Amino acid sequence: MTSITKNSLTSFMNYYHLFHDSYISDVKYEFKKNQIELYFDIFWSGKPTLKDNGVFETNKVKLKMIFKSIYQYNYKENYMDYIDEAYLKIINISNEEYFCFATDKEEPLISIVCKTIEYEELRNTL
């Protein structure tokens, strides 16, 4: 697992193209561990490949993110799993820094505020 840091946050989001056109494939709440796991099917990771016919080929990956030391979370019960553009920023609450992840900046279907985030690409393909 790799930790997202304040310094790696922007490059992480850029590498996964702000989760554009991605899907949440699974959510696991582990309240005893004070963490939430999200599994994503990401269709834009790294640099897309330009094919001979002029069409970009996307790089598909399955991504697991673990949000730890949860401060707050919200979700809509009947949320759709499609993400157009995710939001991930550092926010300050009572002079402490937290990560804020949301499936959308204006009307998120899922949002999580936590102390740490770890991630890994899962090797099984989409």
Image (cartoon, grey):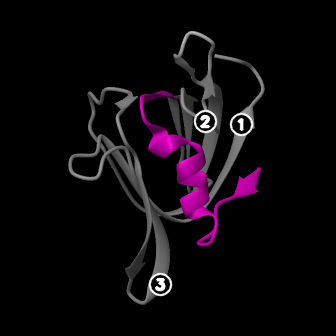
- Mark 1 vs mark 2, CA separation in Å: 11 Å
- Find residue 106 and report its horizontal and vertical position in percent: 21, 51
CB atoms of marks 1 and 2 within 8 Å: yes
Which residue lies under the disc numbered 2?
45
Q: For mark 1, what is the residue?
A: 121
**In this image, 71 relative to 5: left or right?**
left
Q: Residue at x 62, y 16 (%)?
A: 51
Asked if the magenta segment contains residue 122, the reply would be no
- Mark nearest the camera among 3 and 2 is 2
| Mark in the foreground, 3 or 1 | 1
Q: Residues within 10 Å of mark 2 (few under 14, many from 20)?
A: many
Residue at the left extreme of this rendering: 106
Can residue 31 be seen here? no
Query: Measuring 42% from the left and 29% from the top, which residue is drawn there?
Result: 21
Which secondary structure lies at badge 2? loop
Q: Nearer the viewer, residue 57 or 12?
A: 57
The residue where tag 3 is placed is 96
What segment carries the magenta color? 1-25
Q: Residue furthest top?
A: 53
Residue 74, position as x, y percentages in the image? 32, 50
